[in-house]
Image: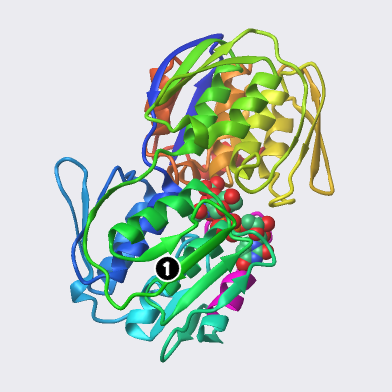
Amino acid sequence: MRWINVEHTPEIKGNVTIPGSKNSSLALLAAALLTDESVTLLGIPNISDFRVICQMEKEIGCHITIDDAGAVHINPNSINHTSFDPKKSSSIRTGYYFVGALLAKFGKVSVGYPGGDNFVSRPIDQHIKALQMLGATFTFHEDYYEVEATELRGETIYFDKITSGGTINIMLAAARAKGTTVLLNAACDPEVSDTAILLNKMGAKITGAGTSTIKIVGVTHLTGCTHQVIPDRLIAGSFLMAAGLATGSVTVNNVIPEHLGSCISKLQEIGIAIVEGDQSITAYATGKLKATRVRTGMYPGFATDLQQPLTSLLTQAPGKSIINEQVYPNRFNHVQQLARMGADIDVRNGVAFIKGKTPLKGTNVHVSDIRAGISLILAGITAEGKTTITGIEHIERGYEDAVAAFRSIGVKINVLESDDVSTEDLLRDVL
Ligand SMILES: CC(=O)N[C@H]1[C@@H](OP(=O)(O)OP(=O)(O)OC[C@H]2O[C@@H](n3ccc(=O)[nH]c3=O)[C@H](O)[C@@H]2O)O[C@H](CO)[C@@H](O)[C@@H]1O
Ligand SMILES: C=C(OP(=O)(O)O)C(=O)O
């Protein structure tokens, strides 16, 4: 069994180079299947979700190699079927992108229901509605669903709810549909724009990505190309927040500061000084934090994926902070664990009321989703003594080597592994 130990670290200082975005990479890896030529993706992080996608693509006959420089070369011209193993595809969220990417070309795709992090309800009704409007039919089985279409035809589609995954998925499907698709109330996330940029390099005709109206003129043929994935704004935001849990400073390099606009503003509001460079951001801890109110929202709103690390930070801000989780109102798996460390947080109807400043104390805690894991590492930085974190495979879904990155800014953190310690031993008083 493997676990992470974090020890109290009063001062942190250093630089972190931010890897490619997980959420963008998962979309780009599927988008590459829309052509029959080779697509090269640069900067894809070697995280466990990427490895699952590689296995899934190989399973349908796609050829994928990773060269010594880390570039991922995808050649889909040998795909020989489009039925994915339900269990494997259900271990990640974005199996649904294979529907968007493969339907126009193959007419039929079967894939497991979306997995990924479990915040109780993560519907895909908007994906289904939009694909049906393009001409697809769905058959739902116990462990998987099948989607069929003799032809996809462009349509004007209004999303009842802004969805980043839904917007990307329908862009993929519409890229090779007949005629023009217009997406209204589309997500504006940088990951949507990044996917559109790759698709346009491949010969797609997409305009408006990054705004709430996207137009896709379907084409019959897409070509190979090379594309660099955007940096992970969510990892960058987590490291900037780490600065506030100690004294010192953290610089994140290889970032697009404009992607972190709402995060930077909030950090400044709570007393963290921020200096932006062209491709870097430095956070200086002033030693004094201020309580705040935050409402999560779709981009450019405050990202729900940064809500959990922010919760840890706000436990150290004197006064009452309020986090209103509007995107996933049940996304509070981390709160119970923070409470075990001494945090005073009350969650009611999707709103967390945080009383600070509470001294945190290291103990055994368990991670149940990626960002909850990061929030517990951050809490461990400020907590007295040692924080032992189990369930670290969730962190590894999205962070290539979180421990090395935290060590590079001086955090006293280690991964431990032992066959003599069982999960039950460490979790006995946790679950
Ligand atoms: C792999 C990936 O990119 N994951 C990110 C993506 O997830 P994901 O793409 O799954 O999230 P969405 O943007 O689709 O969800 C946004 C909101 O729309 C709702 N919704 C979504 C789809 C749908 O068909 N019906 C519906 O009601 C969701 O319940 C949520 O309230 O965006 C989330 C919101 O920024 C992030 O937390 C995830 O890290
Ligand atoms: C929720 C997340 O990922 P996924 O959508 O892949 O579950 C996340 O990245 O925080």
- In the image, residue 339 above or below residue 127: above
Residue 323: percent from left, percent from top: 76, 36
Which residue was labeled with disc 1? 172
Residue 19: percent from left, percent from top: 36, 36
Residue in front for this viewpoint, 133 or 217: 217
Q: Is residue 192 visible?
A: yes
Amino acid identity at mark 1: Leu
Q: Considering the numbered disc 1 on the image, is that residue within a helix, a strand or a loop?
A: helix
Q: Give the range drawn in magenta.
A: 116-131
Is residue 126 shown in magenta? yes
Residue in front for this viewpoint, 294 or 156: 156
Figure quadrant of the C terminus: top right
Farthest bottom residue in view: 150
Farthest left residue in view: 68
Left-right relation of 145 to 230: right
- In the image, residue 58 above or below residue 427: below
Name the quadrant containing residue 260: top right
Residue in front for this viewpoint, 376 or 98: 98
Left-right relation of 297 to 368: right
Going 74% across and 49% down the picture, which residue do you hit? Answer: 326
Left-right relation of 32 to 147: left
Residue 341: percent from left, percent from top: 69, 26
State yes or no: Cβ of the residue under disc 1 lies below 8 Å from any atom of ligand 1.
no
Disc 1 crowd, CA 10 A, few/some/many (<14, 14-19, 20+): many
Figure quadrant of the N terminus: top left
Is residue 70 shown in magenta? no
- In the image, residue 352 above or below residue 378: below
Name the quadrant containing residue 344: top right
Q: Is residue 122 visible?
A: no
Residue in front for this viewpoint, 131 or 383: 131
Going 56% across and 67% down the picture, which residue do you hit? Answer: 183
Going 65% across and 19% down the picture, which residue do you hit? Answer: 268
